[in-house]
Amino acid sequence: MGLPFIGETIEFFKAQRNNRLFDDFVQPRVTKYGKIFKTRLLGSPTVVVNGAEANRFFLSNEFKLVISSWPSSSVQLMGNESIMQKQGEQHRCIRGILASCLHNAGLDALVPKICNSVQLHLDTHWHGQDSLSLYRSTKILTFTIVFECLLGIRVEPGMLNTFERVLEGVFAPAIKFPGSRFSRAKKARQEIEKMLVKVVREKRNEMEFGNEQEGMLLSQLVAGMIRGDITEAEVTDNVVLLVFAAHDTTSFAIAMTFKMLAQHPDCYSLLLQEHVNIMNNKRAGEILTLEDMKKIKYTWQVARESMRLFPPIFGSFRKAVSDIEYEGFTIPKGWKVLWTAFGTHSNPEYFEDPLSFDPRRFEESVPPYVYLPFGGGPRLCAGYQLAKLNIIIFVHYVVTRYDWSLINPNESITMDPLPFPSQGMPIKISPKL
């Protein structure tokens, strides 16, 4: 289990920084000890589990045998009242409000808003350029979509930079001293909270006087606050968490989708034809609809395969709330459990030739708990359908408007704390004639 107290934390974060957590940390220990092994990370004894059955057991037993576990820095910066800290009925209540705008009728209303946001973004940030950072561009876009299309909050200058300062401290040691990552992040979090409290209170006043902005998620959250179902702190903390969960991971998924398309021109040809067919059945200027989303199947297969090879999240920690008997092992109460997406995504037991890129894998359904880019169980990401819309709509408008190519095809991926292309994925672009 490594050195006293810190265990193998140094090796863990070194592998993470190089985006080789599975290859350099997990896989060598699986080879040596088996698919269940123990270690010590961040001062806590930890059991690392791999495989679909382990994923099913631990993710489906959330609130029963295990609870979500995050570092102190993450809790302080995301908020103690956010859904990631809630258990049982409190978790279900908040998740229900979030899901109300991210399923069925809520998605139908979101599609035209996202289409307009993507087109405005391309007109503003891509028009007249011959090269740009794809990753940075998508971060700006997805941040704007979460705030303006989903929440109904106008994005002001500097907001994205403030949120990014918070993210930099999410997995940093929770030590306050001037200039530290955590101190900078904490200060940025206070700025965000001040802004959000003002917006939430203004929204409450509007709604109490009958001026509700129907359908927006912020309105749904504030309505829950007015009913007494949730508190003001729960509203602000969950807005912060939603922004981080919805924009950073989606930006990476989009970037990896384009990386794979650049490396596999045959797949790009099929994808492009899919979007040309959709465009040819529309009048000039007519935007996409939710029905179109259901027809754009191959693009989603490409995106899913990209997320299999490059999952937006590595996995997550759980904490045993009682002694757990699993596969002949006893996991003591209080120990941490880490499941990993790569434990199934890169396993030939579940995906033939797992290191190759093949979107056809997703022509048929995948067994439960094998493919987990959005987590699973009760804590399955509530915004996964929003991510799907963002990816498909962005791809549609880019490939039908622009020719593009990677400037650095061999650009590496790093993690800090989430994965991202180390140089921002610069691309050359030119308008289609």
Image: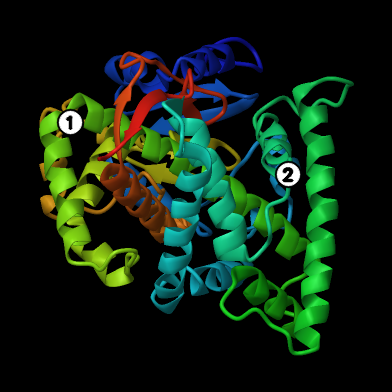
What residue sits 66% from the left and 69% below the top? 218
Horizontal and vertical percent for residue 367? 19, 52
Horizontal and vertical percent for residue 183? 83, 29
Residue furthest out toward the right? 178
What residue sits 58% from the left and 48% below the top? 143
What residue sits 32% from the left and 52% below the top? 392
Tag 2–tag 1 contact (CB < 8 Å): no
Q: Which residue is mark 2?
A: 157
Which one is in front in this view, the residue at disc 2 or the one at disc 1? Answer: 2
**Element carrying mark 1:** loop
Looking at the image, residue 123 sits to the left or right of residue 344; the answer is right
**299 w.r.t. 408: above or below:** below
Looking at the image, residue 375 sits to the left or right of residue 4; the answer is left
Looking at the image, residue 330 sits to the left or right of residue 256; the answer is right
Q: Residues within 10 Å of mark 2 (few under 14, many from 20)?
A: few
**23 w.r.t. 217: above or below:** above
Q: CA distance from mark 2 to mark 1?
A: 39 Å
Horizontal and vertical percent for residue 325? 41, 44
Q: Quadrant of the C terminus?
A: top left
In the image shown, does 169 or 6 lie closer to the viewer? 169
In the image shown, does 160 or 97 lie closer to the viewer? 160
**269 w.r.t. 394: above or below:** above
| Amino acid beneath label 1 | Phe
**201 w.r.t. 279: above or below:** below
In the image shown, does 234 or 207 lie closer to the viewer? 207
**Element carrying mark 2:** loop
| Amino acid beneath label 2 | Pro
What residue sits 80% from the left and 21% below the top? 180
Horizontal and vertical percent for residue 412? 40, 15
Q: Which residue is mark 1?
A: 357
